[in-house]
Amino acid sequence: MGDPTLAEWWERLLARLIDGTILSVIISPAYVLLVFSISDDFLAIMRRSAEGRLVDVQDLLALEVTTLKWGFLMAPIAAVLYFVYDGIQHAVWGRTLGKRLLKIEVIAMSTRVRVTRGAAWRRAAVYALPPAVPIIGSLFALANGLWLFQDPMARQCLHDKAAGTVVVKARGPGTTTPV
């Protein structure tokens, strides 16, 4: 069998959007808790403002602190969830649910066979964990995704480079080539 064809950028993006949607559904109960934890305070402040009464700055600051605390708690939880989601599926099947739907898979660049478990987890760590770090993590995530366009020959993002992987069009209806 010949060398596998690299996946297109849009296939990878669409697969990530599908995976992100799945994870959003999974983590949404935690965000609902966030809304409920601040809703009473928020509604009280809005009611006072609508009635023309002064709003205490301390109440606004307390609401902001509560929101920030939840945000700082949610980011690592979401990152770990994505890390586990990505790591398990790539380690076991060589692809996530999104990649399955798009018929693409992750393989080792050097051997052109299914990615090893260690490489799958390294890839997941470099992809999923940095965004949990405020500001710098988001900048890294942006650079990570855009790196694909800087590397037209191998179409690797930074998480692929860290793990020595490439994303290719799936070779058949089953799983990837065994390790």
Image: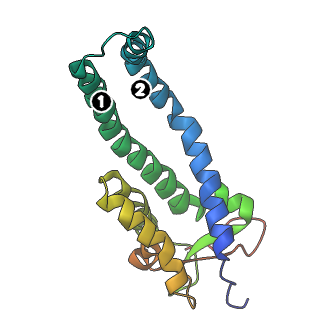
Q: Is residue 176 visible?
A: no
Q: How many marks?
A: 2
* Quadrant of the image containing the N terminus: bottom right
Determine the image quadrant of residue 58. top left
Front in this rendered view, residue 150 or 160 = 150
Q: Is residue 128 above or below residue 155?
A: above
Q: Is residue 99 visible?
A: yes
Side of 142 relative to 63 (left or right) = right
Tags 2 and 1 touching, CB below 8 Å: no
What amino acid is at disc 2?
Answer: Leu
Side of 5 relative to 49 (left or right) = right
- Place of residue 147 in the rendered image (x, y in percent of width and height, measured from the top left): 47, 78
Q: Which residue is mark 1?
A: 64
Q: Residue furthest left?
A: 58
Front in this rendered view, residue 153 or 93 = 153
What amino acid is at disc 1?
Answer: Glu
Q: Residue furthest right?
A: 173
Q: Which residue is mark 2?
A: 34
Q: Residue furthest front?
A: 52
- Place of residue 129 in the rendered image (x, y in percent of width and height, measured from the top left): 36, 56
